[in-house]
Image (cartoon, helix red, strand yellow):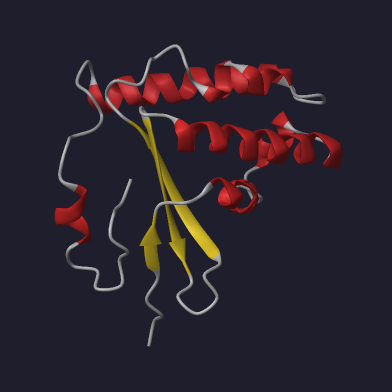
Amino acid sequence: MARQLKIARPCPADAPQIAKIHLEAMESNPLLHAQFPTSESLDAARQFLAAYTEKQLASDTSGVLVARDPESDAVVGFVKWDSPSHPEAVKVEGGELREISGCRPEFLDGYVALAERAMKRSFGDRACYRECSTSHHLAGFPSAAPMQS
């Protein structure tokens, strides 16, 4: 039987674990290692992502939820999104991430260009999100934590 995870809003202390999961999920992606080719640059990327996640947690235009193991309360997964009011000019790949020591921005540039073309092909000029009630979607998950600000 699959274990039921608890969906919850993270606290700032969860940011390092979210960053760790983020990089672990990308471990098999050669692009990650092209962008951050040394253990030092990967560690700097992890630290950057943890700090960036803390900023997102404090932002009104970004959202973050975590999946917690109900027995240990450990963060085992996450999801992030930007609200429709998120400024387009504030994208992690084009900002401070490029300044990380050891980062190879030419690979970030290539990734951003490919992702923008794919989004344009998929969505055209339409928004690639739709607004909906989170509580409606979580209603089917009995172990989901109540959403509180």
Q: How many marks?
A: 0
Residue 95, horizontal then vertical, whole percent: 59, 16
Q: Nearer the viewer, residue 14 or 47?
A: 14
Residue at the top extreme, as displayed: 89
Query: Does residue 13 sit above or below 118 in this rendering?
Result: below
Quadrant where the C terminus lies? top left
Quadrant of residue 132 in the image?
Answer: top left
Q: Nearer the viewer, residue 37 or 75?
A: 75
Residue drawn where x is 22% and y is 60% of the image: 138
Residue drawn where x is 32% and y is 64% of the image: 145
Residue drawn where x is 54% and y is 24% of the image: 92
Quadrant where the N terminus lies? bottom left
Residue 33 in the figure: left or right of residue 94 = right
Residue 101, horizontal then vertical, whole percent: 81, 24
Residue 140, horizontal then vertical, whole percent: 18, 67
Residue 141 in the figure: left or right of residue 105 = left
Residue 109 in the figure: left or right of residue 145 = right
Residue drawn where x is 70% and y is 29% of the image: 35
